[in-house]
Amino acid sequence: MRLLLHSNTGELSLTKEFLGDDIIPPYAILSHTWKDGEEVTFKDLIDGTGQDKAGYKKIWFCGQQAERDGLQYFWVDTCCIDKSNYGELREALNSMFRWYRDAVKCYVYLSDVSTAKRKASDEVSEFAWEPAFRASRWFTRGWTLQELLAPSSVEFFSQEWNRLGGKRLLTKQIIKITGIPELALQGAPLSRFSINERLSWIENRRTKLEEDKAYSLLGILDVYIPPLYGEGMARAFKRVMDEMDKRDKCIQDLHLTDPRDDKKRIEETKGGLLEDSYHWILENSDFQQWRKGPQSRLLWIKGDPGKGKTMLLCGIIDELSITKTAQLAYFFCQATDSRINSATAVLRGLLYLLVNQQPSLLSHIRKKHDHAGKALFEDANAWVALSDIFTDILQDPSLNSTFFVIDALDECVAGLLKLLDFIAQKSCVSSRVKWIVSSRNWPDIEERLERVGHKVRLCLELNAESVSTAVSIFIQRKVLQLADKKKYDDKTRDAVLNHLSMHANNTFLWVALVCQNLEKIPRWNTLVKLNAFPPGLDSLYERMMEQICKSDNADLCKRILASVAIVYQPITLQELTSFIEMLEGMADDLESLREIIGLCGSFLTIRGDTIYFVHQSAKDFLFTKTSHEIFPSGTEEAHHHIFSRSLQVMSRTLRRDMYSLHQLGYPAEQVRQPDPDPLAASRYSCICWIDHLCDWNPSSSAENEVNLQDGGAVNNFLRQQYLYWLEALSLCKSMSKGVVLMAKLEALVKSRPNASTLHELVRDACRFIMSHKWAIENYPLQAYASALLFSPTQSLIRGLFKREEPKWITIKPAMDDKWSACLQTLEGHSSSVNSVAFSHDSARLASGSDDNTVKIWDASSGACLSTLKGP
Ligand SMILES: Nc1ncnc2c1ncn2[C@@H]1O[C@H](COP(=O)(O)OP(=O)(O)OP(=O)(O)O)[C@@H](O)[C@H]1O
């Protein structure tokens, strides 16, 4: 971008071109309509000509107005872009929205609105120019749409350069003229308005070159394409729409969880966020140092379990989003939920929120995603790809100031160390980015984060006084709620308050759990029971466990706790019924199921229909301190139990066309979950049964051998249900996971004794899913059509499910007898490939082609991870 400035002698001159990291000084910007042959061009300015053109005057006036507004620099589209340079023109067209948005003031010069015509006697109508304003040509042109929407300050001027008013003052008139809603004019993010609504704003506007009607929408639709003048309007619009589809697909694929929903859920399950209990942090000197110190880039909040770190971070996020000084991306790790407990999930969540706020950054993801698709975020190399993308974004000069917040690093189960190294490295690379992380006092984490320069450490144990006051406020609030609900008399209320204050030991969680337990105790018995709540989290958990063991429902509760603890992601009430015999037949009785969960002390909590641990420390306690109680035969046996119950529930519920889609070509993206959902009880089983089978220590038990032998349970399941399972995986949007699972299963059965037939079947099933993943993923019922018909005639799966082939196809494609040696075809190069090499660990493949590119492929999934372009 180049700016204009008035020289001392009153002449106009251009600044240097601002590139990359250059800081652009505050500037004003002109919005106007063009007159052929009358505008001062870039060449005029370079040659020192153009002063005699009519357009020179408005440029000169624009400069004068800017000066009056205290702005030295200004920008005018006629002469600040070198249109003879295609690269510059392309860049300008794609940046114009941003340039208007970032201008301090935008002056709209209306050459067809005059204030001079106002009669002296016409005092009643202060706005005598209004009819001309309404009819102004400016409102009929295409490019002026973004010039109206993008800048926050738009001021309208008459042909005599008299100020008519600003965008806010004239809002009513502008709405009438343009039909654009007030919110959009006031600067609400345009993403709030549907694409169709945004397209309707340009419908009646015109542009001199037909393609410009599409190009002038780029900023408004937040897409970027190179202009190709001459392509025609229809094609230009098509390219814009295609680009939006690709962008939406990329965001959809990136989406693993919306951390905004996680935050809401966490706050709700933890009983709501209490402002008075986190406010202390905002005044804390360490926090202030991080907030204000340019050199303090990373704030690390550490403390023992239940000290309120997560809620503290929720509060900080609320505060940072109110002040809006920077964009904000955050992530809550939760060990109990396998969707959000890995290093890749953290980066995906942060990127998801970041591109939501600054969509232009999506280009860094698109570079790889356009080739590799969703596999980019999920396959074995996902971490490498995501961390590279993240690094690129941090180095992007257009990245706005950003806060990254990551809660509970200790709950990042997969890839914690590489995540820590990444944070340690990246937290100091950009002065525009600041980080907050929280963790328990774990040696691994301490060792890595202690090494980081530019950090501030905030230890909750060293801020005992503030935490103690915050816990006291929490206690008071909780006791008030309890007293109100249980109708305590003053004596009981004070006794509860006293007991909690004496024993809380600055631990929020302990207070929350005791209050939860007190809720279940009748008022008359409260004082007697109160003293039985021991201080300390583990003691409290121990007591809860003791009570469960003494109760009539001990066995049922222990089984429930074991199932909820061993699963890889939270399960629903209905899914739970498939794992516990005593709950069989209760899948439709959610009320009773909720009551039964209530019997498990306060270890579990329910949100929606999903069961969660009340806190990670509760789950940790079950595994470390009472493992013998809830896993009497060991955790492996618990995996076996889930595995075999999974096979049972899948065999019962899976069948062809479970969602009654009927048509073979019914697209997956249009599938809506029916109510009741036939997969409700078996969804988890479909996605995780092989993981449980593998974690059941295959070598240890004789029964396992039977399961994994020819004619065993796995063999029978695959023979009878394989295609229905693939359909179910597609309906659960988990086909990629299916590919990984089948590879895992193949590795497991490979070396089993007496399992050669099973191994052959699994190998065939692997080839089947690899070959037809795309079709089944996108059209679930294609499992029974193209997948069967385009498999080799001697494919075992094809033979077993022959009955499912469409009867009406009489002439079937001629297929080979066997799967060919070719596992997959990697498509992408546009010319012949002349060199190929594997990485040392065989995980990646590089191919060089005459099309002047080198492509890097994921060897297992065949996804293209990146394309390196030659000169
Ligand atoms: N500001 C607050 N407002 C409301 N409740 C709070 C607040 N702070 C803590 N709590 C209560 O204390 C409990 C424990 O807090 P939190 O989960 O934030 O602890 P933590 O330090 O993150 O624990 P861990 O390290 O074990 O994950 C919450 O479930 C909630 O009930």
Image: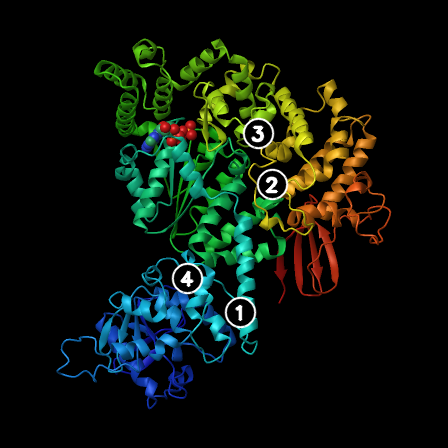
Sort mark 1 into few (<14), some (14-19) or many (20+) by Cα contacts within 10 Å: some
Given the image, on which type of amino acid does mark 2 rest?
Cys
Q: Is residue 307 visible?
A: no
Task: Using the image, determine if residue 331 lies above or below residue 854.
Answer: above
Binning the other alpha carbons within 10 Å of mark 4 as few (below 14), some (14 to 19) or many (20 upward) gives few
Real-space Cα distance between discs 3 and 4?
53 Å
Mark toward the start of the polypeptide (4 vs 1): 4
The answer to which of marks 3 and 4 sits earlier in the sequence is: 4
- The numbered disc on residue 575 is 3
- Residue drawn at (45%, 59%), measured in percent from left and top? 194
CA distance separating discs 3 and 1: 47 Å
The quarter of the image that holds ligand 1 is: top left
Residue 394 x %, y %: 46, 53
Q: x, y percentage for residue 362?
A: 50, 56
Specify which label sits upstream in the sequence, 3 or 2: 3
What's the residue type where badge 1 is placed? Phe
Q: Which of marks 3 and 4 is in front?
A: 3
Q: Name the residue under label 4.
A: 21
Quarter-of-image position of residue 115? bottom left
